[in-house]
Amino acid sequence: MSHSNYQPKNSVLAWIERRLPIFGFMHGSFVAYPVPRNLNYWWTFGGILSFMLGVQIITGVVLVMHYTPTSLEAFNSVEKIMRDVNYGWLLRYIHANGASMFFLAVYIHIFRGLYYGSYKEPREVLWILGVIIFILMMATAFMGYVLPWGQMSFWAATVITNLFSAIPVFGKSITQFLWGGYSVDEPTLQRFFALHYLLPFMIAGVVVLHIWALHHVGQGNPAGIDVKSDRDTVPFTPYATVKDNFALICFMILFAWFVFYIPNYLGHPDNYIPANPLQTPPHIVPEWYFLPFYAILRAIPNKLLGVVALFSSIIVLAFLPWLDTSKVRSARFRPLYKQFFWVLVVTCVGLGYLGSQPAEGIYVIVARILTAYYFLHFLVILPVLGYFETPKPLPKSISEPVLGKSGVAVGIGARAPRKN
Amino acid sequence: MRKTALLIAAAALLGSVSAQAAEQAIHIDRQPWSFAGPFGTYDRAQLQRGYRVYKEVCSTCHSMKLVAFRNLAQPGGPGFTEAQAKTVAAEYKINDGPNDKGEMFERAGRVTDYFPSPDPNEQAARARFNGSLPPDLSVIAKARGVESGVLRGILNMFTQYQEGGPDYIYAYLTGYGKPPAGEELTPTQHWNSVFPGHKTQMPPPLTDGQVEYTDGTPATVSQYARDVSAFLMWAAEPHLEARKRIGFQVMIFLIVLAGLAYYTKKKVWADLH
């Protein structure tokens, strides 16, 4: 997978390089690595996500130095961080809002993949690794939300762990195994804390595989056609690095807006009430990034089937490379798929809204329609569409629209086309 | 044709959804707060008045366990001097111990002490209030909020509306009144226009002239409510001023950096032929 014959000039580095070719590896992966020249800004979210994982791990490690995972002290120790630890408020608000920013970025990243067909041959494994990261992220975020031990922490933990009780025969035993007792209590908090610390490093491990697979098969691109010659690519550094850098800084501005100005906007006031097992909040709502899945869960009247639908809605993504029968990757050249893509986006946003509302009346009916459509999109529309849709003609190569057939630049600048 | 039908169906769904959403909300007015917005700071005099109301009224029933006397003199707070905070603390008797002989003893409060609770434990408080527990007020201003619809909620993201807590507390403290016809109250219940369910266990705590103000501020229920809400916001978010100040510096830095990064990107990509 090496893309360079890099040899360090410094004699110490050269000495190391002969024994462990790490500098050549880094150079091949992050400097010489060829990326398609037509990538648009939707391709910068991979870098943003790596940054967010780093931010979450660093702030998280420092927060752990001050946090006490016991049912009596958890809430107060978080407040102690907010009040008495130097810049503790900053660390905690970065970590709490960082989770939201992480999910915002990952949803953009996933929808980017859906739009441009990033999951298609030869990127199936890359895509599945991404789905695994997404599932690990959800588990990590859920357990992290439990740690402040507020009302929403406690009751979200109760609702979600209770899902497992829907499993036939073993449900009750599994649930009690998860709780470490007969209800959500201190043992639950402590194991969630241990796992919340562990899982990010597992995410980091799968991210390495994800990037490895990416660098092996090469990046997709907005045109969805393969790289055919050197003219189609540019070296990662400086071209992709400066572009990723600019996008990352813009993303950080959004992040800072939340951290410094509206740090509790995405949270729920009830989580500033210490956990009380005897008092159920009027509406138990998860964090915004789980709302679409929560809506799917509640749309189905049968508990077991609801849980099955919830997990299926995520697992179905892993089968996407085989559900989508079209040979054309990019939605740019798939006029029908493009429309269905946007309907899916609206469906997901709609489910998110319904997840935040009480499960009653018209909300449930609409949630059922949207849930049905969600599965219809993946299980029926995508497989069928590949046979009926007439794609637009594909360009001959990535560089053709940019450089023209002769290889001479068309117009000035000849930058990557950004229309999509 | 198909598109139109789809649009009509979507609009009908949206319409019925928003009709149901509109049914629930209790309207709570927004108050002007000095600490709102990107450059908001606490009004020291207001926090000091609010502290007075808290001390003379609220603290007879409510605890505030997470706030210490030293916090009163902390930057970005009510602006007590060290000496004033010491004096305030010394007015309290604190149970301490055990000492070398293994006995508990009473001593005068120190700045490092936390605000003492009015009741020794939860059971004592419940026994005093017919079984209900007055909530701790340390983070109450962040533990309450106002419901906004979807559009308003999205708008709040841009207008930086984060004052739902104090708005609710102000509305609650000034929201007492007679129950509408047909509503029955038990002897321990009181009618409040903004409390969820309207039947609150807390009797109207404030009356005009109850707390003496020395700075000429009108001694009215509405003024008390406003001041104590601001004080509770500070108690819940004591580093708000530092947060907004640093936030502005970070924003300026990032925006300049983004500009530089943009032109760097432009220059690097310009020579790509």
Image (cartoon, coloured by chain):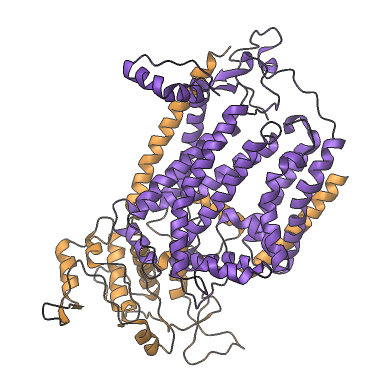
Chain colours: A purple, B orange
In the image, residue A256 sits, relative to residue A31, either above or below, namely: below
In the image, residue A201 sits, relative to residue A407, either above or below, namely: below
**B105 left or right of A331 in image:** left
* Total count of labels: 0
Q: Which residue occupies the foreground of this view, A178 or A49?
A: A178
In the image, residue A372 sits, relative to residue A393, either above or below, namely: below
Figure quadrant of the N terminus of chain A: top right
x, y percentage for residue A275?
Answer: 45, 70
| Residue that sits furthest to the front in the current view | A19
x, y percentage for residue A264?
Answer: 46, 56
| Residue that sits furthest to the bottom in the current view | B187
Q: Is residue A220 visible?
A: yes
x, y percentage for residue B246?
Answer: 34, 45
Q: Which residue occupies the foreground of this view, B135 or B106?
A: B106
Q: Which residue occupies the foreground of this view, A120 or B65?
A: A120
Residue at 36%, 84% in the rendered image? B125
Figure quadrant of the C terminus of chain A: top right
Picture quarter containing residue B56?
Answer: bottom left
In the image, residue B121 sits, relative to residue A184, either above or below, namely: below
Residue at 46%, 55% in the rendered image? A196
x, y percentage for residue A265?
Answer: 49, 55
Q: Is residue B163 visible?
A: no
